[in-house]
Amino acid sequence: MWTKLARLFVIKTKFEAFAVIYALGLGAVERGMHYLQQYPGVGGWLLFACCPVAVFMAGARILDSVERSHG
């Protein structure tokens, strides 16, 4: 039963990977908008910029792992 549940959280295809990366990107931009409201000015923009950069790094890792498992 636990293996069936665990299989739901395994990214198997590139489509699933892109869907997860898209969701991470939406969350990162939302978080960045909150940073801009809390920290107006340069500090808020720097924190906002860090959010998508983290998604770029995670997205590259996700895509790389999907390609390696099927390639």
Image (tube, helix red, strand yellow):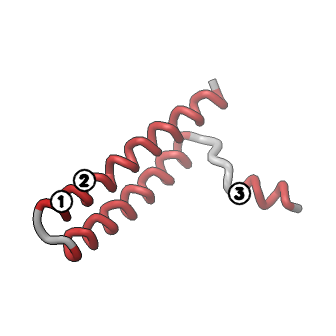
Mark number displayed over residue 49 = 2
Say left or right for 43 vs 9: left
Q: What residue is drawn where x is 84% and y is 55%?
A: 3
Under mark 2, the amino acid is Ala
Q: CA distance from mark 1 to mark 2?
A: 6 Å
Q: Position of residue 56 (x, y in %)?
A: 38, 43
Amino acid at the residue labelled 1: Trp
Mark 3 lies on residue: 8
Tag 1, which secondary structure? helix
Which residue lies at the image location 38% right of the left edge and 56% below the top edge?
25
**1 with respect to 44 (left or right):** right
Query: Is mark 1 in CB contact (under 8 Å) with mark 2?
Result: yes
What residue do we see at 67% from left, 55% from top?
Answer: 9
Residue 23: quarter of image = bottom left
Q: Kindly give the residue lying farthest to the top in the view shown.
A: 71
Numbered disc 2: secondary structure: helix
Mark 2 and mark 3 lie on one chain; the one further toward the N terminus is 3
Q: Is 13 situated above or below 49?
A: above
